[in-house]
Amino acid sequence: MSYRPPSGSIPPLPGVYRFRDSDTRTIYVGKATNLRSRLSSYFQNPAGMHPRTATMVQTAASVDWVVVDSETEALQLEYQWIKQFAPRFNVKYRDDKSYPYLAITLWEEFPRVMVMRGDKRKGVKYFGPYAQAWAIRETVDQVLRVFPVRTCSNGVFRRSQQMGRPCLLGYIGKCSAPCVGRISSEDHRLLAEDLVSFLGTGTDRFMRELEASMREASDRQDYETAARRRDDLGALRKALERSALVLPGDTSADLVAYVADDLEAAFQVFHVRGGRVRGQHAFVLEKVADEGPTELMTGVMQQLYGDEEADIPSEVLVSELPEPAVQAWLSARAGRRVHVKIPQRGRKRALLETVGTNAGQTLQSHKLRRAGDLSVRAAALEEIGEALDMTQAPLRIECVDISNLQGNDVVASMVVFEDGLPRKSDYRRFSIRGVAGQDDVASVAEVVRRRFTRYLAERAEATDIEFGPAGGANDERKAFRYPPQLLLIDGGKPQVAAAKAALAELGIDDIAVAGLAKRLEEVWVPDAEDPVILSRRSQGLYLLQRIRDEAHRFAITYHRQKRSRRLSVSVVEDIPGVGPTRRKALMRTFGSLSRLRKATVEELASVPGISAELAGAIAAHLASETVTPAVNVTTGEVIDQDGPGRPA
């Protein structure tokens, strides 16, 4: 290969390397105990390599590396780069982010219990994941009797503070009502920490303490207290019924097993805390090369425990051992000894076999559910490429949509799909600046001009690196640097012509442009008298519709945010005696114009900087305002100032 570095320039030391394409985009990240030996192995005869690896090497245009002190550091840096750059040729750990967790927000002054999904956040303690959200709510409903930690949102909490009245849970004893001062912030935090301990490994301790308290109250003939403790015990036992004791009560372990075929691997994870299964986790990954069991298990360990907030147990029981550096890495992250091993006999071995059985069922159901999904996406892209006379299938498609209301608050969205799937980290939104009124054609031209001006600027900044130590010359977060193969416009012939003209002004002629018109779902291409008509059953048309609808959703969301802010600020700006500081305080306290209108004089006076006299003037001014609902002339919807449209 033309970019192959001289062998003598590569150090025979541990490190992490990355291959980049011609746009300097990272396409593969790997680690090695000997960089010289590993990198040299990529530049052999392609016939002896795995097809996917050979494709990666031929796609790449440069390679660079970073030398580290140990395999443990290499493991950590490799994880960070994979997380940051999402290389297309690395194993795709498609973790199901829709799993719900029971979360306790310990970072807040008054921690709360809630159901959370998605990426984990700092300062939040997680338990789970659970199969269903209702299972979390049933568990919370039982434990709140003993640990009455707040569950309300911050808005409800602030409103209760202002009104001096708790919510229903505060009245029925399932919340300690810190909002009205029934409990101090320190005592409420202790309650939250006790709940964390109970859900973790302190189950037996709390049960013993409750039972001892019940007997003590009974001995001194305080039967009401004894009855409450009895009911508390029953509630905790009911919460524990869902998780039977599977290992000794002091066991804290994760069990990881997988089943794989030539293309995919299904992993199953059981999280055991206090001897009970506290969570169950399953995901499927796509194998992109000839990864063996050791490489797959190492990657999954990075995926499970790479985040700062990861809960690392004392033992990780696996069906296949990862690389030796993993155990040292986990021990360093946890600050204590972590054992990674394959159990050979007994209850742990039996439970791991159960985990493996579940992994096999996960892979089977995944194949049945998603059979042909990859091939369908590939066929859809091929169909789009053929319909638009493109030389190759459009692996990256960007779509632009304009949103406005009678020429006000004109905004645009740009969504990105790669390999037929949304890449939300590359989504962008635009506030239209150089167009007056409702002119979609000029708005499309402005967005295309701004987007691709940034593309040319960022591409010019990129440094061509043929080989050598990795540096900070290229900022991979600059997503505008990567051009699409197809630019899709939500519109018809005029919008497509405007986009093509904007590209021509910038000297760009290697990007295909097409428009999808809503009326008949016809596809327009530049300089064509008639549209391209795709079959209503076409997978290509279905994919274009999905992309167009996603762009519309993203644009209308931004438009509503801008409109709501403008309406709220314009009304509050007219109040005599309310300047920028007080206006911000009012909107921070009440959140929306609707809530501000409903606020009493006493609630207004509780806002910092608002006197009782000024509060009366604000209330009188808002009461005198007549509100005329805005109507979308296209859809006939009444536009609510606080949210999305509703049928008129």
Image: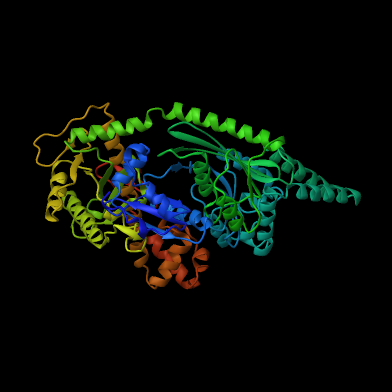
The answer to which of 5 and 50 lies nearer the viewer is 5
Q: Residue at x 24, y 50 (%)?
A: 483
Q: Looking at the picture, how far across and down is residue 206, in whole percent?
A: 76, 50
Q: Is residue 110 left or right of residue 71?
A: right
Q: Is residue 324 above or below residue 380?
A: below
Q: Compared to 431, does 417 lie above or below?
A: above
Q: Could you say which quadrant of the image residue 646 lies in?
A: top left
Horizontal side of residue 212 vs 2, given as left or right: right
The answer to whether residue 641 shows anywhere in this view is: no
Q: Nearer the viewer, residue 211 or 310?
A: 310
Residue 355: x %, y % from top left: 60, 34
Examine the rendering and report whether any part of residue 462 can be seen: yes
Q: Residue furthest front?
A: 8
Pick whichever, 363 or 148, lies toward us: 363
Q: Residue at x 19, y 60 (%)?
A: 434
Q: How is the image coloured?
A: rainbow
Q: Write the residue at 10% across / 38% down.
A: 528
Q: Nearer the viewer, residue 554 or 466?
A: 466
Q: How far from the left and from the top, in percent, is residue 516?
A: 21, 38
Whole-percent x, y for residue 486 in the image: 22, 43
**40 sits left or right of 343 in the view:** left
Image quarter hosting the C terminus: top left
Residue 424, compared with residue 525, is above or below; it is below
